[in-house]
Image (cartoon, rainbow, N blue to C red):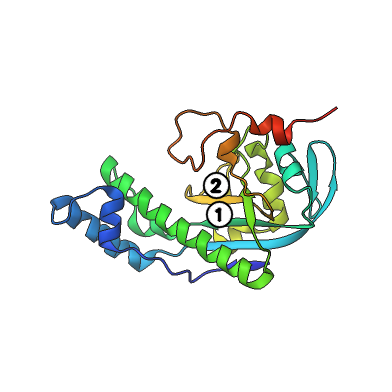
Amino acid sequence: MEILTGIPVELELEQMLGRLRVGPGSEDAKAVGELLEKARAVVNPKAMYDVFFVGEKTTDTVEIGGALFKSRVLRVNLEKAHRAFAYVATCGRELDEGLGGTDDPLRRYWLEEVKLAALGAAMGFMQQHLEGRYRPGKMSRMNPGSLEDWPITQQTELFSLLGEVEGRIGVRLTESYLMVPTKSVSGILFPTEVSFESCRLCPRKVCPGRKAPYDEKLWEERYAVRG
């Protein structure tokens, strides 16, 4: 089990202004600068991961480290994998605790973008750490709830693999299987010869987080049950 803290985060004003589409020298730019100054003092992203052997597979299930996951897509993606990495990464509770809430929707949006930057730093740091230690080669990842095929309810099994997630990195799973802090992500990383993006199997037309176009033929070509 690897617990990663002390993760560096770059919260540069110029970069954040571009991300927020705020003009330099404006009153909003000044307010963003003040927010970043406070954020730098408290931001503390974290991540944890562990490696597990891939076990028995059925048509639409795969066992990882003793936990059973029901997903045809995950099962096919792990067809040739002997090990996989379960992980949780988070922006950290400190941003909410240190900066407090606000009724200003614009300030809330700014803070959410700061949290996303911290989460991105946690994910990048974790992947570099994992690659440096295990040398897994090319990898892809899947996240519970990203596809109808792998429902968010399977967060329970994923968290069970990693043990005391809240005590170690402060991420709590709610009764509706969402994570707190909200800018947290969990999933399975796995070695692969062919890059995988869940977005390619998702037909949702409006999605600000889309990373790849929908491929309506991919399910039939790769994931449909034959015979």
Residue 49 place in picture, x, y as percent: 64, 61
The answer to whether residue 96 is visible is: no
- Which residue bears the numbered disc 1? 171
Instruction: Give the residue drawn at x 54%, y 33%.
Output: 214
Q: CA distance from mark 2 to mark 1?
A: 6 Å
Contact check, label 2 and label 1, Cβ < 8 Å: yes
Q: Secondary structure at mark 1?
A: loop
The front one of 142 and 27 is: 142
Q: Quadrant of residue 48?
A: bottom right
Mark closer to the chain start, 2 or 1: 1
Circle 2: residue type: Met
Question: Crowding at label 1, few (<14), some or many (≥20) Cα neighbours within 10 Å?
Answer: many
The picture places residue 183, in percent across and down from the top left corner, at 47, 50
How crowded pointer 2 is (Cα within 10 Å; few <14, some 14-19, many 20+) is rated as: some
In the image, 105 versus 85, the foreground residue is: 85
Q: Quadrant of the N terminus?
A: bottom right
Q: Is residue 100 above or below residue 199?
A: below
Instruction: Tell me the residue at 66%/49% (across/down).
Output: 194
Pick the residue in front: 170 or 65: 65
Q: Is residue 152 placed above or below 84 in the rendered structure?
A: above
SS under mark 2: strand
> Does the rendering let one see residue 56?
yes
- Give left or right: position of 64 versus 167: right
Amino acid type of the residue tagged 1 in the rendering: Val
Number of numbered markers? 2
Which residue occupies 55% across, 47% down?
Answer: 179
Residue beneath disc 2 = 179
Q: Which numbered tag is attached to residue 45?
A: none
26 is higher (above) or lower (below) than 70: below
